[in-house]
Image: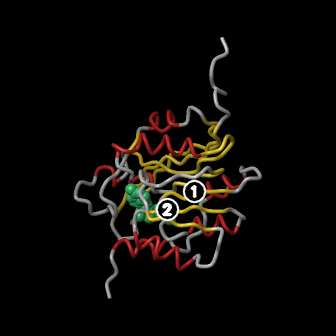
């Protein structure tokens, strides 16, 4: 039986290793270990986080993601799962927000409100770990949709990504470019901004003059 491209994507990513940025982010978290995984997909990051003692609130727009993760983490009371979009999810307070390759697909018109929710749900000293799509990525320009599993994309200039983190201490900021084939076997140019940043105390950046 032929599987849908989304099923193929989840099959290919379910058991991937945690990305280096997430390992680094986890090393920079204090005593409170509560994470939100935005667009949790097949649950690779949830798995890494619970192995490291986190309670994880995962959400995803796709029913298949939530069904898979429900089966995968059945009986594990460290994991709660919700089928929701970036805009409809009710963000609990957290010490870590993970958004790995997922905010790419937040509709542009919703991004500002979604980002505000993400910033607000983070505790002071809480850490954001995630990636943003650059304009040179195939997904940002491919109007045929051939390389897109999710229809809308939200792409950024580097300065726009940096400006999201004015109330944060940026711990890592990397621009990533590479090319190869995606999980559908289609040629792809990747262009991402990968960020790990710690939320500052309120007004820590305000002038005292
Ligand atoms: C490229 S996958 C990344 C999955 C996972 N974070 C990972 O790195 O393995 C993007 C994920 O974002 C989810 N997604 C797409 N649009 C979304 C939206 N508007 N709200 C929430 N999740 C969304 C998809 O269903 C998918 O699971």
For disc 1, the marked residue is: 36
Q: Which mark is residue 181?
A: none
Q: Which mark is residue 59?
A: 2
User: Which residue does the image show at 69% across and 55% down from the upper left?
Assistant: 26
Snapshot quadrant of residue 148: bottom left
Residue 18 position, x and y percent, is 61, 64
Snapshot quadrant of residue 206: top right
Q: Nearer the viewer, residue 147 or 77?
A: 77
Q: Is residue 98 left or right of residue 24?
A: left
Q: Classify mark 1: helix, strand or loop.
A: strand
Q: Residue furthest right?
A: 31
Task: In the rendered view, tell whether residue 7 sits above or below residue 22.
Answer: below
User: Which residue does the image show at 40% across and 67% down from the upper left?
Assistant: 62
State yes or no: Cβ of the residue under disc 2 lies below 8 Å from any atom of ligand 1. yes
Say whether residue 180 is visible: no
Q: Residue furthest left?
A: 144
Residue 139 position, x and y percent, is 34, 54
Look at the image and tell me in which quarter the N terminus lies. bottom left
User: Which residue does the image show at 61% across and 36% down from the upper left?
Assistant: 168
Residue 14 position, x and y percent, is 52, 73
Q: Classify mark 2: helix, strand or loop.
A: strand
Q: CA distance from mark 2 to mark 1?
A: 8 Å
- Bin the neighbour count of mark 2 within 10 Å (Cα to Cα): few under 14, some 14-19, many 20 and up: many
Residue 15 position, x and y percent, is 56, 74
Q: Residue furthest top?
A: 209
State yes or no: Cβ of the residue under disc 1 lies below 8 Å from any atom of ligand 1. no
């Amino acid at each position: 039986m032929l599987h849908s491209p989304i099923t193929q994507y989840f099959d290919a990513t379910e058991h991937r290793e945690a990305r280096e940025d997430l390992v680094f982010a986890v090393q920079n978290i204090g005593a409170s270990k509560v994470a939100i995984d935005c667009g949790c997909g097949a649950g690779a990051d949830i798995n890494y986080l619970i192995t490291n003692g986190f309670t994880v609130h995962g959400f995803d727009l796709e029913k298949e993601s939530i069904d898979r993760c429900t089966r995968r983490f059945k009986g594990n009371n460290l994991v709660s799962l919700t089928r929701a979009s970036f805009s409809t999810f009710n963000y609990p307070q957290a010490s870590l927000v993970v958004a790995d390759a997922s905010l790419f697909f937040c509709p542009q018109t919703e991004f500002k409100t979604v980002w505000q929710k993400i910033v607000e749900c983070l505790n002071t000293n809480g850490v954001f770990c995630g990636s943003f799509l650059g304009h040179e990525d195939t997904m940002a320009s491919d109007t045929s949709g051939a390389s897109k599993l999710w229809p809308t994309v939200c792409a950024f200039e580097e300065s726009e990504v940096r400006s999201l983190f004015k109330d944060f201490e940026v711990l890592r900021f990397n621009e990533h470019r590479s090319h190869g084939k995606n999980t559908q076997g289609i040629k792809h140019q990747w262009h991402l901004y990968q960020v790990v940043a710690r939320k500052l105390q309120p007004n820590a950046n305000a002038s005292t003059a």
